[in-house]
Amino acid sequence: MGRAVMVGRGPAGIRLFVLSTVIILTARSSRAQQGDGCGLSVLGPCSGSLSSLGYPGTYPNHTVCEWEISVPQGRRLHFRFADLDIEENNCQVNYLRIYDGIGPHRTQIVKFCGLGLNVPDLILSSGNQVTVQFMSGTHQSGRGFSLAYSTTEHTDLITCLDKGIHFTEAEFTRYCPAGCLTSVGEISGTIPHGYRDSSPVCLAAIHAGVVSNSVGGQISVVSSKGIPHYDGSLANNVSSTVGPLSNSLFTFKTSGCYGTLGLESGVVRDSQLFASSVWEWSDVIGKPSEWGPTGARLNGAGLPWASAHSNQQQWLQVDLKKEKRITGITTTGSSLLEYQFYVSAYRVLYSNDGQHWNIYREADATQDKIFKGNTNYLQEVRNNFIPPIEARYVRISPTQWHQRIALKFELLGCQFHQARPRIYHPARPPPPSVATDTPPMYGQTTHTPDIRNTTMPPCTINDVAFATVLVPVLVIILTTLILTTVCAWHWKSRKNSSEGVYDPSHWDRADWWKSMKQFLPSKMAEGEESVRYSSSEVGRIRVRGNTPRLRAEPAEYAQPLVSGVMTSLGQRSTFKPEEGSDPGYTDPNLYDAPMATDIYHAYAQPLPASGAEYATPIMIDIASHLSGSSTLNQPTTVSSFMGRGPASLLTRTDSGQSGRSMYDTPKSTEQATPTKDLAYQVPQSSSQKPVE
């Protein structure tokens, strides 16, 4: 700590000397302010903010203030003005000066005097020490000034008054100075939903827990389209208000280590919560009421934790089972209307072994951090740890409260991945003392407990790296097995489907084409050429002594019968007569062979009344029939049939019956007499006679 004398001048010119104490925020650099014209100011280790007394209102007459700023050797300072408004009727006594150095040997860098001055450029020092002097005489107007400073490596320094609407980039990074919590301005919104564009950026960064008010720091900002409503909350001693619709909003990029650590969700078990004491009592009808540590879960139903005694020796503790990175804490009061208890200020202690405890302090600070708690029994309040805590045990020690110590809480953070040696953890603390009487609804403050302060040991490892390697390997193996199974099934199915009834490959191709013709227009199919088979190919149709059966495919035209082979005829089929000069049947063996009595012959189905369609018959050359020698040596021709009207699909016939009584004779231009036993059958029609 250091002492500074504040010198004041009253309206009558009488000087008053008041002794005050200024807290020095770091031991490495010397900073002090003196005078009666000093406004809200924070002099951080590498940055800070200054303002005149009463800013943004009119500064008082006949005042003076000097700020002496020092940073580590080898560094320099620069200054950026947010506002400069000094009445200029007498610049001999109304001015702002910046000097290089401290003391009588300082040299002036710049002097300002005037209303509404705009100073866009940074003002640089030549050394690591600077004096800022502000003086006022008699004046009628003027707001005074507000400025920010930092070391020169932060070239993107902004002031505490810069708002979101002052930046046009979709994403940008800037450096916020220390002390923006004391600046005037109002923010609307909260993290992670975003802040209204009218909010000061650095003040919103403190509320979001991105930077510390006592140190400042670098921020990464993302702008986006505004939302209709902005919520308000209290966090890090900054209150945000409810805000209406705006054109745009901004939020902050963070490390992502702001998840809850399991108190509200139940991941942290009841056996991991401890307290110094528990308030327990019975009502007038004898019903017991216990306010134990298991009720200290944020947003949990039932009674919260409340201590049996109201003093600063009370604490609430959680064991996280392993070291975690803890970035914040959210607290609330009793949340019970009939018991409006809450903690308004507290300390946070942490430990790795449950025995040696550290009191949390901000970076480069020499005093313990006192966190501002709740202002009522219901509202949630968030405080962030900058820098974060890395520990297994966390303890909350209330320092101020309303009526009685009672709270619920949740820790914010994430897993801690740095490797460290294993640490022995002792057994749980002894059970808390219990108060059986009903204490009064008020408390009192006692002296701060003497708590040991030790350094924080290094941190532990977890198995994230092993899981990162194992999971992709398992996925690759599983994918390979699935692909192998699918390929084997597909190959087997394809092999089964490719096995045909007939040996010749030409027969397979023809069979495939017949199945495909059902997808072609009927007019296109009429122009197809006849498929011919030799007698040697037909002879191979026999399968091991059994009469072969042609595979029936859904084709547009019917296939003729060959030597008593039965086929299935497709719908809308008949035989198409082929125009030729010498039609007829050439193979006499086809008709001489007697037909078995148990063979059923299929008939071609007649066409509907809408029109006739014709099928292209199969041309068959049979050198030798099953019945023996050939009696006819005529050239091969096309046998044509045509029929209309309804007919039976199957008819049983004997070898001794005449084919003329049951079958049509094929049409012939030379009046050929059909043979008695026909291999091609066409259904009879009562309305159609054979063409002579």
Image: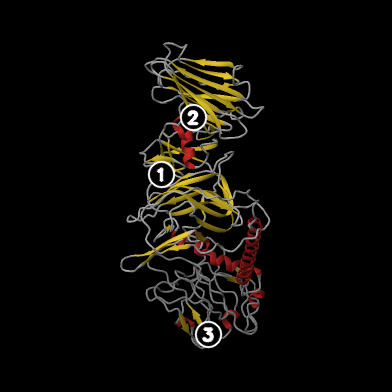
Instruction: Write the residue at 50% across / 60% down.
Output: 273
> Is disc 2 placed on a helix, strand or loop?
strand
Q: CA distance from mark 3 to mark 2?
A: 125 Å
Q: Earlier in the sequence, mark 3 or mark 2?
A: 2
Q: Is residue 453 above or below residue 60?
A: below
CB atoms of marks 1 and 3 within 8 Å: no
Looking at this view, is 367 or 502 the one in front?
367
Q: Which residue is mark 3?
A: 599
Q: In this view of the protein, which residue sits in the foreground, 330 or 656? A: 330
Task: Give residue 233's mark.
Answer: 1
Camera-side residue of 321 and 425: 425
Left-right relation of 59 to 22? left
Distance CA(mark 1)–CA(mark 3):
94 Å
Which amino acid, mark 3? Answer: Ile
Residue 670 in view in this figure: yes
Label placed on residue 20: 2
Q: x and y percent of residue 590 in the render?
A: 58, 79
Mark 1: amino acid: Ser
How would you rate the neighbour count of disc 2 (Cα within 10 Å): few for under 14, some for 14-19, many for 20 or more?
Answer: few
10 Å neighbourhood of mark 3: few (<14), some, or many (≥20)?
A: some
Task: Give the mark nearer the N terminus: 2 vs 1.
Answer: 2
User: Dot 1, how many residues are within 10 Å of its Cα: few (below 14), some (14-19), or many (20+)?
Assistant: some
In the image, residue 4 lies at what x, y percent?
Answer: 53, 27
**Element type where label 3 sits in the image:** loop
Query: Looking at the rendering, which quadrant does residue 498 occupy?
Result: bottom right
